[in-house]
Amino acid sequence: MKKEERQDSYSHILKYTGLFGGVQGLNILVGIVRTKFVALLLGPEGMGLLALFNSTIKLVSESTNLGLPVSAVREISDAYENGDQERLNHTVKLIRSWSVITALLGMLLCLLLSPWLDRWSFDWGNHTLHYAMLSPIIALMAVTGGELAVLKGVRQLHHLAALSVYNMLASLVITVPLIYLWGERAIIPSLFFVALVQMLLTIYCSYRQFPLHISFARPLLGEGVSMVKLGVAFVVAGIFGSGVDFIVRSYLNNAGSLDIVGMFNAGYMMTMTYGGLVFSAMETDYFPRLSAVNELGARLNETVNKQIEVSILLLSPMLMAFMVGLPILVPLLYSKAFMGVVGMAQVLVFAMFIRAITLPIEYLPLARGDSGSFLLMETLYDIMVVGLVIACFRLWGLTGTGVALVVAGVMNLCMVLIYMRYKYNYVLSGTVVKYALMHLPLLAGAYLATCLEVNWMYWVAGMLLVVLSLCISLQVLHTKARLWDSLKKKWRERWQR
């Protein structure tokens, strides 16, 4: 249980961002194949149906998991850091017991709500049975979430990385054949079998660390009440967040069509997944580091600001390359039927840039157990998203949804900066502002390049800006973390082996 040294250094942040970013990159490659086949087999309408079911699963799951995926990590991590094996085993047993309860709760709630879910999301046909069939999936996800919390709490980073890859491969192997054979009828069975395999893989890793022990004795469950109370605000925030996904997709389905829902989901998920190359390390590395900072002031600000700096430097050139390459990526990832989403996705890149600044700050209330502040910020943002998406879709169609998310992101950043300054005395550093102002004009230039009608000018201007952004980021990272020296050292060690 030896703690890492210099956990707030640029080298440490780069190391773990690279680890989980690499895993996420591999997942993207596997996901490209899966999404391509599914999009070709189902088309935009089938993809829209899949998006609605996934939104429902997320909504019900996050409404009933009692915040265990967050609060359980904090409990286990505390026991692990103190080296108290007896307390650690007891905490794992407690969390597993509560996970079973949340699994049963989620399954029951989904069954009860299935008629209303059908009524809220469709204006044709009867899909009550389909929603009821999602209930076992929610139960499986609850068990998986508890076991993942155990692995995160005891810093099993390599297991977590491997599970991420195996889960994506399982999703590919299961989903594509089923949908190829039975089309839209296979959507729910494929979701179930993917969730089942993911649960089995996760409990295999977790049970090897901690053999299965659960109990529903009242004294034991009573010990988890404080943990559950902490998670209540996370649950409510999850309900609002998942509810926004559900409301937005249902609105687009009723105001537009399932094709619109499918394209919106494609553009949103494609951009969010791409940003995940950088953001994927935050929950497993940055969150525990931030939680370990006990006092407000300079050290807290430095921890947050360094994470933002690295996020901006790594993400900016990637976002520009993504924006410029969208006319190729969309038919590659999906099909030519999805080309209407290019404009939305190109605008949405700006929202991801803003998220690189906002997300590390938003972890502050989570790290300090301030569930009320977290709930307040999430609720206000969700309200803004719903209102802006509806208004902008009416004005500019699908591209307007991307504009709405950018405007919501800017408003959220301003709100978060003001509130965190008041609540935690957090101040955005001058270095963060400098790096943002270095890359934002380049990002805007890349967007203007996408408006060029002459094909060769589009690609030349776009790629020049990408290269310029990449050179700036690499130079800064080399100065901050001696990047080249670190890479040379790793290559020498590899060749010596």
Image: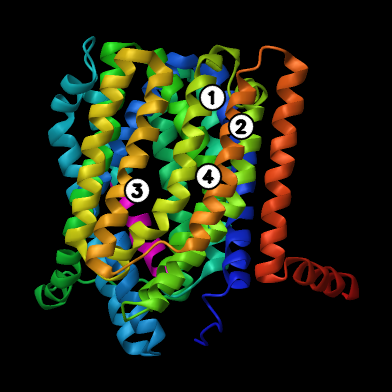
Cα gap from disc 3 to disc 4, whole angstroms: 17 Å
Query: Secondary structure beneath disc 3?
Result: helix
Say which amino acid is labelled 1: Val
Give whichever of discs 4 and 2 has the lower sequence position.
4
Residue annotated with mark 4: 275
Disc 3 residue type?
A: Leu
Residue 274 versus residue 335 in the image, above or below? below
Residue 101 appears in the figure:
no
Q: Say which residue label 3 marks.
A: 413
* Alpha carbon distance from label 4 to label 1: 22 Å
Can residue 248 be seen at all in this image of the molecule? yes
* Three-letter amino acid code at the position of disc 4: Gly
Contact between labelled residues 1 and 2, with CB atoms less than 8 Å apart: no
Q: Secondary structure at mark 1?
A: helix
Q: Nearer the viewer, residue 126 or 12?
A: 12
Q: Which residue is mark 2?
A: 445
Percent x, y of residue 244:
26, 34
Q: Look at 36% across and 71% down and name the residue there.
A: 212
Q: CA distance from mark 2 to mark 1?
A: 34 Å
Ranked by sequence position, the earlier of labels 1 and 3 is 1
Span of residues in magenta: 139-152
Q: Which label is found at residue 38?
A: 1
Determine the secondary structure under disc 2: helix
Rendering quarter of residue 37: top right
